[in-house]
Image (spheres, helix red, strand yellow):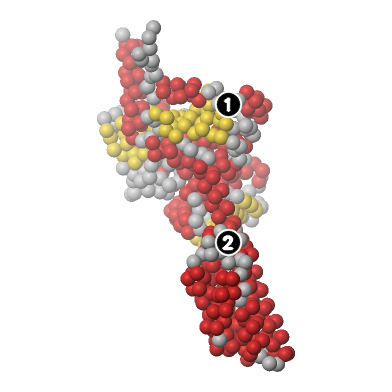
Amino acid sequence: MVVLKDESAPIRSSIDVMRVRQIVREWAVSLGFSLVDQTKVVTAASELARNTMVYGGGGELRMEALNSDTRRGLRLTFSDQGPGIADMEQAMKDGFSTGAGLGLGLGGAKRLANEFAIDSRPGQGTTVTILRWNKL
Amino acid sequence: MAEQESKVAQLLKKHEQDVLQKWLSYQMSSMTWRADLMKESDLREQSREFLQLFIEVSQQSGPGADAAAWKSAKEMLAEVSRSRAMQGFSPSETAMFVFSLKQPLFDTLRRELNDVEELSREVWSTTTLLDKLGLYTVEAYQQSRESVIARQQQELLELSTPVVQLWDHIVALPLIGTLDSARTQVVMERLLEKVVQTGASIAIIDITGVPTVDTLVAQHLLKTVAAARLMGADCIISGIRPQIAQTIVHLGVNLADVITKATLADAFAVALQRTGARVTRVGVKE
Amino acid sequence: MERIPILKMGRVLLVTIQVDMHDRLAMTLQDDLTERIVQDRAHGVLIDISSLEIVDSFMGRMIANIAGMARVLDAETVVVGMRPAVAITLVELGMTLSGVKTALNMDTAMAMLMASFADKEHFNGGSQG
């Protein structure tokens, strides 16, 4: 697996969240994702970027375009230095929210991605990574 | 070392036309030549081009020094393999394009080099090089066949899921065969696209031809129904066989919010009624 | 301040969301719409999202909220023209917007509202007589 290119983007405001949607869309298009796959990955990115902004107090998105023998993928890593997640099991559940959201963010993003990883400890921030492969 | 290795290149340059002629006649007289699939002029052109690239490749020596020449030689061979795979050549017929160069090449070496040690060294290095390129040809052939298969699979997938318009505002999707996750996804997308295209307010998914439904497929169907509703269209699922009905209940899949009908005809009748149309008999003698 | 325009056609309010909205803009639209429903005594709200390339859970919730608030204010909401890819993604996300009416295009949406207005008239007339 080779990283074709990578780039970072700040997530501080709801305008930044919108920019994340735009740039993730551009990358998904350039990797040849189908329309439905583009929409899924952009939506997942939007959920996670909003989490980073609202719950993490802002942070950063790192995007990587991956290339393996047979497929291409987009890996998105959202990281913040916020309060972290105390109860992971609960946070992943649909309908659970400590904020104003519907609580579909984490679970929803997981369902929209092919691979999902989350690393968080109270007081040490949160890092969420999703990966979506291009269906060939 | 570098000088010695380029001996082949020197000789080849000197006798290029001669080698090319012999190679061509050898290729065309061989068992693997397919006059039915390929024109002689094309073969001539390909052979000429490859010979020139081969001279370049064998000219430069040492690891890394030959990157550019290697690249263009490989690209050329990939193109040859691709076109031959399309034309219907077998893998060995395709590989023979490269391997058949050995005979005229070694003839020339044997004629021109008198020192036995030098001859064997040159033959060895040349044969190694040609073997590599020949194997690469097979690999490229294999790859292009695989992409053909992948494309055909995709086409089959699309062919096997026709969405038909039954009436104004009514489309139907008769599903036949086993549904797996990938196919159901394609089906779902095509149905929804068709709904937009036709402005259909009702979509009938007929699963009469589906032998079994597992939890995953049932969930995909439910998702399709939910997505269609978000777009403003209703779905009717028809043709649920008794066994499938049992499975669905057994699996605990909730179809309560979905309109289900036993047959496509029943579903069509409901759809007509909902879109404000009515079926009446005319001219029937009492 | 940046705002999404709300058009009035008889007793119907029409909103066309043409660009990707950031969250604050979406919240403003929600506030503006509820205000206008009361002010214009509207009975119907049409939200055209046919240009939207994505709807995430935040925007989905905003749409559900608008429909809910409108219902309390005696107005019916129809969401118009959701794209297939958006619908598939929303379902995957776990949002089905149950309780929100949907239509494929403006014609159907308008017909739906007119039909429900007629029902209302009928009901009001009946109860009075």
Tell me the residue at 47%/32% (across/down).
Answer: B172
Q: Position of residue A28 (x, y in %)?
A: 49, 55
Specify which label sits upstream in the sequence, 1 or 2: 2
Residue located beneath label 1 in the image: B240
Q: Position of residue B17 (x, y in %)?
A: 52, 83
Q: Kindly indicate the quadrant of the structure image that contains residue B54.
A: bottom right
Placement of B11 over or under B263, stated as above or below? below
User: In the rendered image, is residue B5 in sight?
Assistant: no
Residue located beneath label 2 in the image: B89
Tell me the residue at 56%/70% (across/down).
Answer: B28
Q: Kindly indicate the quadrant of the structure image that contains residue B240.
A: top right
Q: Residue furthest top?
A: B286
Q: Chain of mark 2?
A: B
> Are there few (<14), some (14-19), or many (20+) residues within 10 Å of tag 2?
many
Question: Closest to the observer: B205 or C118?
Answer: B205
Placement of C110 over or under A121, stated as above or below? above
Placement of A23 over or under B246, stated as above or below? below
Q: Secondary structure at mark 2?
A: loop
Q: Amino acid at mark 2?
A: Phe
Dot 1 and dot 2 within a common chain: yes
Asked if disc 1 and disc 2 are in contact, CB closer than 8 Å, the reply is no
Q: Secondary structure at mark 1?
A: loop
Q: Position of residue B243 (x, y in %)?
A: 65, 25
How far is the residue under mark 1 from the one under mark 2? Answer: 47 Å
Q: Quadrant of the N terminus of chain B?
A: bottom right
> Are there few (<14), some (14-19), or many (20+) residues within 10 Å of tag 1?
many
**Along the horizontal axis of the image, is A111 left or right of C36?**
right
Q: Residue furthest left?
A: C10
Q: Amino acid at mark 1?
A: Ile
Q: Position of residue C114 (x, y in %)?
A: 32, 25
Q: Chain of mark 1?
A: B
